[in-house]
Structures are given as structure tokens and as C-alpha cells.
Amino acid sequence: MGAPMAYVVVPVAVACVYQGARDAYALVAVGAVMAVAAGWRLGRLTDAAFAVPAVEWLLIAASAAALVTWLRRALSAPARPQPYAEATRLLTQLRTVARHLPGGTLDPGGISMHLLDEVRATVPSDRAAVLSVSGGGRLVVLAQYGSDRIDWETNLDADTPVADAWASQQPQVANRSLSRSQPADGHVAVLVAPLVAGVRTVGLIAVESDRPGAYDRQVVAAVTDLSAPAALRLEAALLFDDVRSLATSEERQRLAREIHDGVAQELVMVGYGIDNALARLPEDPGDAAEAAADLRSLRAEVTRVITELRLSLFELRSEVDRHGGLTSAIADYARTVGASAGLRVHLSLDESTARLPAATEAELLRIAQEAITNARKHARAENLWVTCEVDPPYARIEVSDDGHGIDAEPPEGRYGLSIMAERADRIRGQLRIQSRDPQGTTVVVVLGADGRRDTVSAPEGVSRQDDQ
């Protein structure tokens, strides 16, 4: 009986491949019926020599049908898209959605200010801020309002309403100010509401009133109702900002590699070729001396271009380190440029431990780099003064030189000033370019409120003067 039953497996497998699992299992059932009928006719249903092989081959046929069915489904399943194809699809969708959003932009600062305007119109408040996590896992102030610049509590590890609201995803009410610049014994009304998108906390809104007990359950419910839709908008803006920053950083690194491996290396070889030509020139006066002078002039120009390329590479690769801070990045760039150009650099750096949003720090660094580069290339200056004051959400960067001053009409083909203005507008900063007394140029970019309050104690902040 074993040999005839072996042929049950082949039609079952073929039926499964071409017709599907239903027909295959139907054939197994037909085989079972035929085996029972044959055994009954021959009087061997109870004979182990007949029954055991029949059952074994029926089970093998059923297993073959199951295996072929699984293989058929696996082979016919749609191929999973490659990572780059999936990324392209998602970025295309993001671009399409961004173009149809109100205002046509995904700006975390603008969305945060809009939320604060809604809160100010809904609940009593004297101060408020929207905070989110930036580089290094610390909170940064995206937007705020109040009579003065406020040193908000941004530590998620301390026992504060800010940390509790972030961890619990529930509103927190307190009676002590979240501002480290406010008197410790001053009793106020404080409300911290989390901005939760799905299951993730993307930010916090902190609201304070100088009237104790101002935030009851109705006020908390009103702020919660405002924060729910704002959280989704803010998450989309933060994600878009991260993608844009990553793409910008990758492109800058790519350009740096292309310049280093391409034109920079070729110029170095040209310089070596000129040196070899100078070495072969005879010492006789006349045409040889004139040719030598031309080659030396050409060699000096090639050296200048190579120096410019190296500084451009340094600028492209300069980033704000998440541990070093904005002032450190600006100071490193100023020192490097000053050393290469023979400028005496005077640094005044004052930075608190709090941080600005990463995208804001990047734009301020690029503005400072452009101002320093302009002083080196066009001002013919001897001294460079760089002042950095960073106390989020306030920041002030000033670059001054003692060169020949601002041209009445910018030379054709120079776009540095307009690019600085565009960068300042992007972070809602104020850019001023003015003459310096008695000579030279001053470039100032200010972010946040004017005026500066000493709100950071010595252990918490960094303040230093440096001349080189």
C-alpha cells in the first residue's frame, strides 16, 4: 500500500502551486476517502500493515500542501521598499504637506508663539514659555513672553513641576516660580502643561501669574485643550527641523569632501609644478628673470587660493558641538581665521549653561562666520573683536573690525550681507550692520529681548575675556 500512496504527494503539491491550498487539501481528502474505501473492500481497515502507511502518506501530503502554500505566499508577497526609496517617499509627502500648511512653513518658533498668543488670550498670565528638548537632552526655550527676559528652569532631573509634567504627561500646578531669576520666597500661580503627540512628550508650556491661586481646574482644562492640537503641529515642525538640519549638515560635509579631494588637491599640484619650473630656470638675466618673477607671482596667487580653500573647508565642517556650546564654536573659528590672516583677535564670551535650539545655534554660527570672513577678506583690518552673549532665549553676537569700513555700494557678486539678513530673519533675530568709531565695521545680531539681566550665577555660567 505504501508505494501507491506515495503518488498522493505529487498531485497535491502540483494542485497547491497552480490552484491554491483549497484544491490541494481537497485532494488529500479524496485520497483519505479512497484509502478507507480500499481498506474496507479488502477487509484490511484494522490491519496495521495497511492503515499505518496510509495515514503516514496522507499526513505527508497534507504537510507538503502546507509547505507549498507558505512558500507561494512568501514569494508572492510585495518586496519591502529599500531604505532610500522609503525615505524619498516620506520626504516627498512631507514636502507636499508642508506646502499646504497655513503660512507655508514648519517653524517651531512660530508655532510656539502662536500657542502662547492663544494661551494669553484664554487664561490670566504674566509670563509664559514653550520649551522642548534639543541637543544634549536638555530643555530649550522655543518662545516666551513676559516683561523681562526669564531664566526658566530647564532641568529634567530636578524635582520640579517641569520634570513632573514631562515624565507623567499630566498638567502640574505649583505656587513657586519656575524662573530662577524670581525671588525664592515669591508666591505665584504656576501651570505646566505637557505637549503630547501620540505617546511622546514633545514639549511643555509653562504659564505663570503673579496672582496666587489663579489656575483652577477650569483653567487647567482650557490650557490642556489648547495644547493637544498644538502638540501635533509642534512635533511635525521639530521633525521637519531635524530633517532639514541633517540634510544641511550632510550637504556641507559632502561639499567639503568634494573640494578637498578635487580642486584643492589639483591646486596643490599646480603649486608644486610652479616650484619645479622655478627650480629649472637659468640664472641668466633677461627673459628668464622676467619669467621667474611671473612664476613667483603666480605661485603666491596659488598659495592664496589654497589658503582660502582651506578656510572654506574649515567653515563648512564647523558645527556647534552639543557639549561645547555656541560661543566655543565661534571662538574657535575666530582664532583660526585670525591666525591665518594675521589679525589680532579679541574675544568676549559670556554663555550660560542653558542652550538655544540647535537650529538657532547653527544659524547664529553661520552669521558670525560670515561677518568674520568679511572682515578678513574685504576690510583689510588689523584687529577683530568678537563678543558673544548667550542666555536663552536671549543671544547677542557682535563682530567688529578696524578696517576701511562699509562700502557705499556693495561690490557686484557679493551676497554675504543679504545671506546674513536671511539667516537672521529665519530665527526672528535683528541684524544691524553699521560703521565703527573711529573706523571699521560692526555686525550685530540680537535674538530675544533687548537688555541683559545678570541671572546666571558664577557656577552656572561661563564668562571670560580673551585677547590673542
Image (cartoon, rainbow, N blue to C red):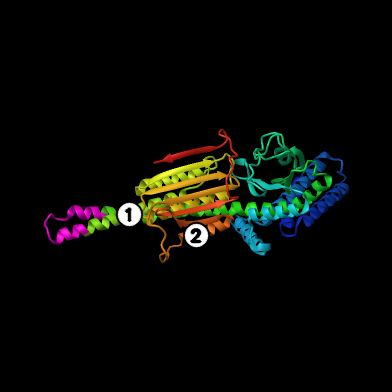
Amino acid on which the number 2 mark rests in the picture: Ile
Q: Is residue 335 left or right of residue 87?
A: left
- The residue sitting at 25% across, 55% down in the picture is 274
Quarter of the figure with residue 138: top right
Query: According to the image, label 1 marks what residue?
Result: 304
Query: Where residue 222 is drawn, which disc sits there?
Result: none
Residues packed near mark 1 inside 10 Å, few (<14), some (14 to 19) or many (20 plus): few
Q: Percent from the top left, x then y, of residue 335?
A: 41, 44
Element marked by disc 1: helix
**Which residue, as the protein is rendered here, is positioned at the far left?**
284
Dominant SS of magenta comes to helix
Residues packed near mark 2 inside 10 Å, few (<14), some (14 to 19) or many (20 plus): some
Q: Nearer the viewer, residue 307 or 454?
A: 454
**Residue 80 in sight in this render:** no
Q: Percent from the top left, x then y, of residue 444?
A: 50, 53
Q: Percent from the top left, x then y, of residue 149?
A: 63, 46
Q: Percent from the top left, x then y, of residue 106?
A: 64, 57
Range shown magenta: 273-293
- The residue sitting at 83% across, 45% down in the picture is 217
Query: Where residue 419 is drawn, which disc sits there?
Result: 2
Q: Is residue 275 left or right of residue 33?
A: left
Real-space Cα separation, disc 1 to disc 2, in angstroms: 25 Å
The question of residue 136 being in magenta is answered with no
The question of residue 290 being in magenta is answered with yes
Quarter of the figure with residue 160: top right
**Which residue, as the protein is rendered here, is positioned at the far front?**
438
Element marked by disc 2: helix
